[in-house]
Structure formats: C-alpha cells, structure tokens
C-alpha cells in the first residue's frame, strides 16, 4: 500500500463524520423514504423535515461512499449497504442507530473511552447518574430497546433449544431471562418442562405477557427481582448473554448464587460468545462496549472456567451453537473457594 493510500484510508477510518452521517440517515429513515418512492431530493427533504441544501450535501457524502446510489442528479436509490438501513431489515440496524432511542445514549458513552482508560471506570453511570439497566427502565425508549433485544433472542433461541440436552421434564430457571423468548421456545419444545424467569421489573412484565399469551398456563413463574439475591430452586440455572454485562467480581457473585442454590444434580448453563472465537472485529467491539456501558467484558473459555471455579462450580463441557454462542455447562463442586 502506498503512503497516500494509507493516509487516505487512515483519515477515513478516524473521521468521526461517517458514523454520525450514518446515524443521521438511519434516524431520518432515508432508506425507507427512498424505497417508498420519495427519491427526489425535494421529496426527501420534505419527508424528513431537513434543510434541502444540507441534506443534498449529506447525500453526496453518502453516495460517494456507496451507501446510496444517485442514478440521476438529485434522485437517489438504495445500494446493498443502504438496504441494511431499511426499518424491516432483519439486523434491526436502523433502530439500533436511531438517535431518538437508546442508541444515542450508548453512543455518548462510547465517546468517553479515553476518560474510561484514565479512570478505569465505566462512563455510562457517570454520564447519566444511573447504571445502564436503571437508565433503561427510566427512559421512554427502553421499551423499544427491549424489543430489539427480544428480536435478537429470537434469532438464537431455536438453536439453543436444539443444541443442548435440556431436562425435558425438569425445572429451568432463566436468570436475566429478558422477555422470556428462550423459555417460550423451550416450553413449546418440551411440554413437560416447567420454568421460572427472574429479571428486573420491566423485563419480568414483558415475559409474563409473552409466556401467558403463548398459553403456557401454570407451567411458568416470573419473578421480578435480582440474581444478586438468593435464587429460587431449580434443576437448571441458565445465564444467557448475562455474565458479559458484569465485571469479574459481580460475575463470581452471580455464579456463587447459583452454586449456593444448587443441589448436587443442578446444572448451571452459561451461554456467551467467547472473546477468542468468532469475528475479532465484532468481539473486540462488543468487549469495549460492554465495559463502556456496563463495566462488563467479553471473556475466553478459560476465564469463564476460572471465575466459575472461584464461585464453587466445576466445568462439565462446552457446546458450540451455530449462532456463534457457546453453552458452558457447570455443576456444583467444592464450595467456598476464594476469588
Ligand atoms: C443482555 S440481557 C440478556 C437477556 C436474555 N437472557 C437474552 O439473551 O436475550 C441481560 C438481562 O439481565 C437483566 N438483569 C440486569 N440486572 C439484573 C439483576 N440484577 N437481576 C436480574 N436480571 C438482571 C436485564 O434486565 C436483561 O434482561
């Protein structure tokens, strides 16, 4: 690569403009307006209540980066990239980027990376005076954000159900189970399975609605509470995409709670991505994001095993799920080990 090209690519990579321009395009729903036939600059400006001159300049910025096409002067079309910005795209990328939602609050926390490097503290609570989950509960767009998470959960729940030998007539306790997508899938597949979901009040409410509407009757219990308190009994505890939200101390606390509530037949399933597996771009950005938003982190299998050992659990095996997740199975082992 010659020096000019390297400098050009570097300048593009470090410019803060492209992320901001893409977020503006997503928030204004430019792709959806174009798809609906409002593809002339004047129609787009009217639909989005944007200044026409500045909107044209934004479109020029995006067209030369192949986000949109401009088949005629002032008339725009979609490209393979901008189809991902359509509201109905399976990735739900538009909603994640929408600056009227939680995306803007998350973005603001990412701009505090340098401060976080100096303080070692996650910036989200500093910025908003609340932890991420407290802020989510207090913020009007939290409902949309929970909807996005449930959409994500639907993308992998079926694979989790298929990938693991679940206790077909036992009792699964899903800790931080969100809106109940996994338990719904499990109870549909195994008609004798019973379940308990434990989560914060908003998620617990959404889970009650989902599991009731699905007709699971009295086979489930939903508890609004915290997994830092003593846990209800069960044959299996599941922690799906939960532990990466937490620092090592809190992760050991959560796992220890499972170990203390377990009897010798109980299985604890941790379902997470692994830092050294899969796409390093995605994993390293998830890792930094987990810290900035929540003080959490992504981990390798050996790190999860160490933390589980400190919590009094023994690693029994690992199952890879096609969605890129790993199911780590633990059983109660020698208790009262120090962190
Ligand atoms: C990343 S989401 C994962 C949700 C779900 N397991 C999934 O994979 O889609 C983490 C969940 O932990 C819940 N959570 C956060 N703090 C909690 C606490 N102290 N006790 C119980 N649940 C909590 C959140 O409300 C959220 O539903």
Image (cartoon, rainbow, N blue to C red):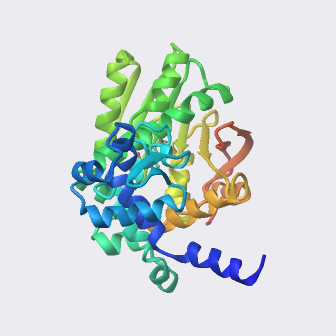
The front one of 18 and 260 is: 18
Residue drawn at x 41%, y 51% is 96
Image quarter of residue 267:
top right
Residue drawn at x 37%, y 70% is 108
150 is higher (above) or lower (below) than 121:
above
Quadrant in the picture for the N terminus: bottom right
56 is higher (above) or lower (below) than 321:
below
- Residue lying at the far front in this picture: please name it: 72
- The percent position of residue 285, horizontal first and vertical second, equals 57, 63
Residue drawn at x 42%, y 36% is 88
The front one of 236 and 82 is: 82
145 is higher (above) or lower (below) than 192:
below
Residue drawn at x 44%, y 63% is 60
Horizontal placement of 323 versus 99: left or right? right
Horizontal placement of 232 versus 258: left or right? left
- The percent position of residue 64, horizontal first and vertical second, equals 52, 62
């Amino acid at each position: 690569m010659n020096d000019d090209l390297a400098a050009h690519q570097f300048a593009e990579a470090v410019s803060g403009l492209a992320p901001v321009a893409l977020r503006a395009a997503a928030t204004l729903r430019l792709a959806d307006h174009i798809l609906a036939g409002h593809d002339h600059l004047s129609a787009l400006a009217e639909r989005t209540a944007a200044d026409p001159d500045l909107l044209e300049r934004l479109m020029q910025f995006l067209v030369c980066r192949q986000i949109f096409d401009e088949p005629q002067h002032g008339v725009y079309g979609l490209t393979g990239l901008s189809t991902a910005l359509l509201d109905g795209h399976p990735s739900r990328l538009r909603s994640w980027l929408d600056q009227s939602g939680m995306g803007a609050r998350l973005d603001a926390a990412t701009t505090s990376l340098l401060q976080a490097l100096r303080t070692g503290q996650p910036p989200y609570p500093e910025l908003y005076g609340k932890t991420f989950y407290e802020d989510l509960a207090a913020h009007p767009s939290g409902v949309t954000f929970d909807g996005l998470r449930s959409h994500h959960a639907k993308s992998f729940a079926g694979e989790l159900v298929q990938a693991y030998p679940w206790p077909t007539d036992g009792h699964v306790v899903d800790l931080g189970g969100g809106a109940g997508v996994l338990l719904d899938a499990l109870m549909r597949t195994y008609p004798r399975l019973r379940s308990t979901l434990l989560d914060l009040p908003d998620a617990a409410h959404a889970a009650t609605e989902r599991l009731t509407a699905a007709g699971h009757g009295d086979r489930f219990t939903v508890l609004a509470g915290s997994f830092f308190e003593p846990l209800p009994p069960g044959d299996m505890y599941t922690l799906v995409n939960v532990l990466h939200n937490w620092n090592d101390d809190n992760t050991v606390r959560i796992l220890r709670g499972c170990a203390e509530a377990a009897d010798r037949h109980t299985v604890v399933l941790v379902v997470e991505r692994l830092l050294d597996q899969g796409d390093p771009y995605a994993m390293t950005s998830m890792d930094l994001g987990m810290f900035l938003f929540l003080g959490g982190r992504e981990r390798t299998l050996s790190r999860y095993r160490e933390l589980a050992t400190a919590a009094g659990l023994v690693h029994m095996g690992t199952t890879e799920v096609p969605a890129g997740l790993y199911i780590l199975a633990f059983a109660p082992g020698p208790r009262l080990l120090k962190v």
